[in-house]
Amino acid sequence: MSPQTLNVILFGETGVGKSSVINLIAGRTVAETSTEVDGCTMNSKDYGFDIGSRRINIWDTVGLNEPQMGVNGYYDAIVKAYALVRKLNEAGGVDLLLFCMRGNRITATTQSNYRLFYEVLCNKKVPIALVITHLERERRMEDWWERNEASIVRYGIQSVGHACVTGVGDNVQKYKESKAAMSHLLSQHDNRGRFSMPPEPWFIRLLQGLASLFSTSTPAAKDVARILMKRCGLDPETASRLAGQLSS
């Protein structure tokens, strides 16, 4: 594993501007900003590109959206979560979480997304940084952070760094500042503290966390097993074992 490879999960609600953040990091258009990954929780799309001698792997991942979904949304999330954990395991784990959020009020969904990715998926063992988007109307983008930092901390959201950005290229100066902010944020991290887990316990941990955050009770084990077989391609024995662990 090269120390120059960085595995990043970029997460946030649909429409917060994750694709624009990816393009800021890459320094060119690699993600289409008009077609973000669909709104299904845990749906992800991965990107890989080189910046100088450094390889950046990014999983653009949809978090919980408002309103929270019921059992059908949970079934969809099971399928997406299984695919994400497999990809992360194959890549060797996670080095950094980037929580992408609009520059407006902190909501219950904001807090739930923080818990889902930082506390549940990564067991509080992966550094998390905040990327505040849609700040093109700020006179000075960093002003937003100075006004809101105390509020973010009060809501229990801790971070190792932040970047205040705009993905709108009309304001050349602010766009350049945004690219520089993302570059500076990433430069502070490497893969020496990479976090990973064996796929099965990682998957179960994530599904248990999802169930606690969805507005639904945990479905019956037989229904979960059916989804794991039909939509994830697992054999009956493995599906039943995982479903049993989830319901225990």
Image (cartoon, helix red, strand yellow):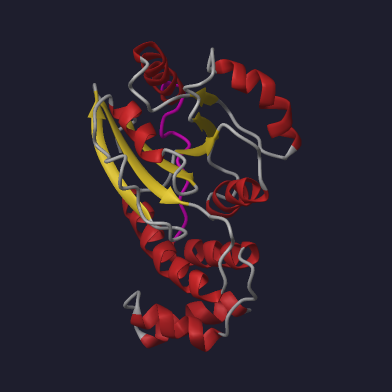
Q: Going by the image, does 192 lie left or right of 208?
A: left
**Residue under the image location 51 percent in, 21 percent down:** 137
Quarter occupied by residue 152 = top right
**Image coords of residue 205 (percent x, y):** 56, 63
| 189 in the magenta segment | yes
In depth, the one of 142 and 182 nearer the eye is 142
Extreme-right residue of the structure: 154
In depth, the one of 34 and 2 nearer the eye is 34
Q: Going by the image, does 28 lie left or right of 44?
A: left
Please state, as top left, top right, bottom left or bottom right, where the N terminus lies in the image.
top left
Kindly tell me whether residue 4 is visible in this rendering: no
Kindly tell me whether residue 160 is visible in this rendering: yes
Is the residue 200 above or below the residue 140 in the image? below
Quarter occupied by residue 130 = top right
Stretch in magenta: 187-198
Majority secondary structure of magenta residues: loop
**Image coords of residue 27 (percent x, y):** 27, 24
In depth, the one of 185 and 64 nearer the eye is 64
**Residue under the image location 43 percent in, 61 percent down:** 40
**Image coords of residue 125 (percent x, y):** 57, 43
Please state, as top left, top right, bottom left or bottom right, where the C terminus lies in the image.
bottom right
**Residue under the image location 73 percent in, 31 percent down:** 151
| 68 in the magenta segment | no
Is the residue 18 above or below the residue 145 in the image? below
